[in-house]
Image (cartoon, rainbow, N blue to C red):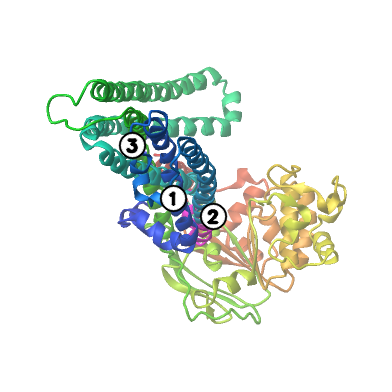
Amino acid sequence: MSSVEWEEDDPFEEQRDKIENPMKRLFLAYGRDYLPQVTVGILASVFARLLDLLPPLMLGIAIDAVFYEDAPFSEQIPLVLLPDAWLPTGQTEQFWFTIAVIGGAFGIGAAFHWIRNWGFNAFAQNIQHDVRTDTYDKMQRLNMEFFSDKQTGEMMSILSNDVNRLERFLNDGMNSLFRLSVMVVGIGVLLFWINWQLALVALLPVPIIGGFTYIFIKTIQPKYAEVRSSVGKMNSRLENNLGGIQVIKSSNTEPYESDRVDDVSMDYFDANWDAIKTRIKFFPGLRVLAGIGFVVTFIVGGLWVFQDAPPGPFTGDLSVGMFVVFILYTQRFIWPMAQFGQIINMYQRARASSARIFGLMDEPSRLAEDPDAEDLVVGDGDVVYDDVSFGYDEETIVSDIDFEVEGGETLALVGPTGAGKSTVLKLLLRMYDVDEGSIRIDGQDVRDVTLKSLRRSIGYVGQSSYLFYGTIRENITYGTFEATDEEVREAARAAEAHEFIENLPDGYDTMVGERGVKLSGGQRQRVTIARAVLKDPDLLILDEATSDVDTETEMLIQRSLDRLTADRTTFAIAHRLSTIKDADTILVLEGGEVVERGTHEELLDNGGLYAHLWGVQAGEIDELPQEFIDRAQERTARLIENAESDDD
Ligand code: ADP
């Protein structure tokens, strides 16, 4: 997927663009709860880094004041800050004192490092967990239009990649940031304190390294963007091919596909190689700069030590010990500078990820629940569609749908593919809101009741019977978690599923769904029917409930469905008209409109679309009027056209 397409497909772009400062929002909304952890982390980090600075300094002191005895111990930086009474005077005592300070710095430093890691990790992990669960909760409440293929990919990527990327900055990034700050400030202060003139020399490469790093980031960033985009394209291609492997094999296009994969992989290679070429120049370049700084400091400092203050602005003395301290500190100072780039990089990535996360979270729900909504109360189960019109986008898909179903009756929707049958029923479940008109259940508008009570009252058995990864029992009790084993068995019996379940390796405890035992379409369907039976809803929607099964199983299921629908208001969509011919009312839809309505017999007598469809299914193709065939061809052509324009 190219970056341009990506932008276009991006479902949350609009909200994301409105977010001004995602990192501030992240810290305010989520960081606050973990303030103690991050405070502990920051304090421990500062102490740990300060303690890290002690050993080199003590080494310098030991050289000057203990080994060479050229300078008074108590006047050394930073010992001068301590009262003389605390400091030993004898050479041996001073030696052991120095060792004790170095040992103590390592020991206590280690403890602080542990606390620092604990604090930052606790901070990062907790925020990550909270953000992930909040994003998931929000995602579940998004409108159905977000759940098409491309967009679920995008949501998956937000939930995993983006959320996980926060950790990099919240833990590693912030850690480095404080280390760097303490190093820069701490070492800077000490160097200037010891010898400000030499400090200037030693820090000379710092601005140059800063500039060099800046140029590096500017150069590498577009290259990384290119790498990410080519990875995206490659993954799409691979996913696509794995999904379509059957088509590839059956059309003998393996070599063609291998070439296509070769192409995208090569693009990825090129983009990566381009970035690598820049990256591998950076560190050697940095080494050269750091080396120059080192050599210059060594020359100036070295000459100063064994001759005298070099000509120019340099005055005073430089001891061997302090010279060593300078050399050690400059080394520690230069390298972290190079990490600034990385921190900025991590920050920017975390910022982009936060913006994507909040973009999703801010997506308004078109299906806002009325704050005063009350629970739906179903009595008889009368359902009224009052002049309903609706379109997913601007285009109207169903219009002027007007009908009434009395409690306990069955209403069937038939018509060609794409006529709008499923759409009509999705409106009842309030997957979408009607654009015009209203839908009422026992006089209550579906928009005025709580979504929870509405969906609890309606059972749905759809075309694709999706099973969750889990046991058969869990799949049947899904949504009716408190059911007893006996009730589960009863429901399975009613759905004609009990027998095949008993024959599975672990019976009701057999794992099914993705990664579990593969059930046939018909078996899956019966499990979902059992789920609906167990739920015992007031209203029932059967959306091509027997589409996936052979005629014999269909007969069995039909029997169980008849039992299920007997005294429940039922809506049934079916292609096989034989399954709905006993419905109380049949609505025939075409192009989003009701073109005929009546009972099976009435419609047959009518001799319209229904009678023709019935004729086709009864095998009377030869007797169909030409007009019917023409219309069917027109419809198919339209469907193909639509499908093609969807692909564009
Ligand atoms: P049927 O159930 O009669 O086969 P549908 O209700 O599924 O028909 O679809 C009716 C029309 O609505 C079709 O043209 C289809 O392309 C379109 N449609 C269905 N679902 C969506 C959706 N989520 N977004 C946009 N258009 C859709």
Q: Extreme front residue here?
A: 90
**Between 11 and 159, the one nearer to me in the picture:** 159
Residue under circle 3? 341
Q: Which mark is residue 86?
A: 1
Whether residue 409 is situated above or below residue 118 in the rendered picture: below
- Of badges 1 and 3, nearer the viewer stands 1
Q: Are marks 2 and 3 in contact (CB under 8 Å)?
A: no
Q: Are marks 1 and 3 in contact (CB under 8 Å)?
A: no
Give how far apart the Cα atoms at labels 1 and 2 are: 50 Å
Give how far apart the Cα atoms at labels 1 and 3 are: 43 Å
For label 1, count other residues whose C-alpha is less than 10 Å away and answer few (under 14), some (14-19) or many (20+).
few
Residue 145 at what x, y percent from top left? 46, 55
**Between 408 and 71, the one nearer to me in the picture:** 71
Residue under circle 2? 129
The magenta stretch is: 129-152
**The quadrant where residue 542 appears:** bottom right
